[in-house]
Amino acid sequence: MTPTHRPTRCLIHLLLLATLGLSPVARGGTLAMFRTPLGELDVELFDQEKPITVQNFLSYVASGVYSNMFLHRCVPGFIVQGGGFFVTNPFTAPAIEPVPQFAPITNEFNVGPRLANTYGTLAMAKVSGATNSATAQWFFNLADNSTNLDNQNGGFTVFGRVVGGTNVLNRFNDTSGTNGITEVDFSGVLGAPFDTLPILYHGQTNVTYADLIYTQVSVLRLQVTLDAGGRELSWNSVSNRLNTVEFATHLPPTWQTLVSTPGTGGPLQATDPATNSPTRFYRVRIDFSAAN
């Protein structure tokens, strides 16, 4: 399946740089974008608060095992879940396989700040009754589930939140088919994980692999280093798209372009030669308006 093309969206993280007392490196954190046929979800990951969980997620993304992954569970008013299954040979002999799992990680719900499972947060799925069992699967909270999920199985670790695309997330709260999504029970064919399988709905009576809600995850990191010649910016670029670094000197921001360059899928760098500005805000904008 080829994801639908949407208007330009911005993966944004602001960096406030002060001249006095600034450490040599200022991290902009990690932003992940979940691209679906319904649109994009921009997600801020909580690197500092839940480092083990975020690093685990990033390891799965970097390894490529999430390729051709699809959302396999949707319960309106509760959660929508992915990270568990992908389609092999999608254009020749498609088949569903489980995502290869790395070693389970330590549950971080009670490590650092306790982050509640509220609407729009991203959390790790686990095996029932096994606190430290999270591996590849994750879910978005479609409602405030804190009373439930914060108080069972050691708490479900929240490691990110949606910062853009809540209109896309909201669509999973209605699977009646009127907004292009429905859910089907394929547990009799594929097993228990697929009893609430969300699919794209356009009035069809037969479900095909093309109806699955495929989800592509890409990660954007932004780091700024100060030196005598200005500020060196580096980020993990998005391939085959225009990556634009913008800056502002005050809030609310008036964004100005520093540099625009085609993404390679690897790290890119840019230099801001300005050294006389006591504060500086940066963002990287990714243009998805062009066709593949």
Image: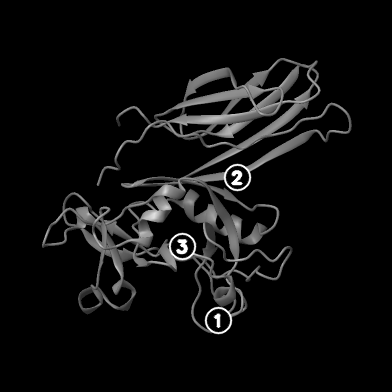
Of pointers 2 and 1, the one earlier in the residue sequence: 2
Q: Secondary structure at mark 3?
A: loop
Of pointers 3 and 2, the one earlier in the residue sequence: 2
Return the mark for residue 30: 2
The residue that appears at 49% across and 64% down in the rendered structure is 143
For residue 14, what is the image quadrant? top right
For residue 53, what is the image quadrant? bottom right
Query: Gap in Å between the C-alphas at discs 3 and 2?
Result: 22 Å
Between label 3 and label 2, give the one nearer the viewer: 3
Q: Secondary structure at mark 2?
A: strand
The residue that appears at 62% across and 66% down in the rendered structure is 116
The residue that appears at 39% across and 29% down in the rendered structure is 240
Instruction: Please give left or right for residue 286 compared with residue 248 in the image.
Output: left
Crowding at mark 1 (Cα within 10 Å: few <14, some 14-19, many 20+) = few
Return the mark for residue 130: 1
Q: Amino acid at mark 1?
A: Ala
Question: Which residue position holds label 3?
Answer: 142
Q: Residue 52, how many percent across, how many down?
A: 64, 61
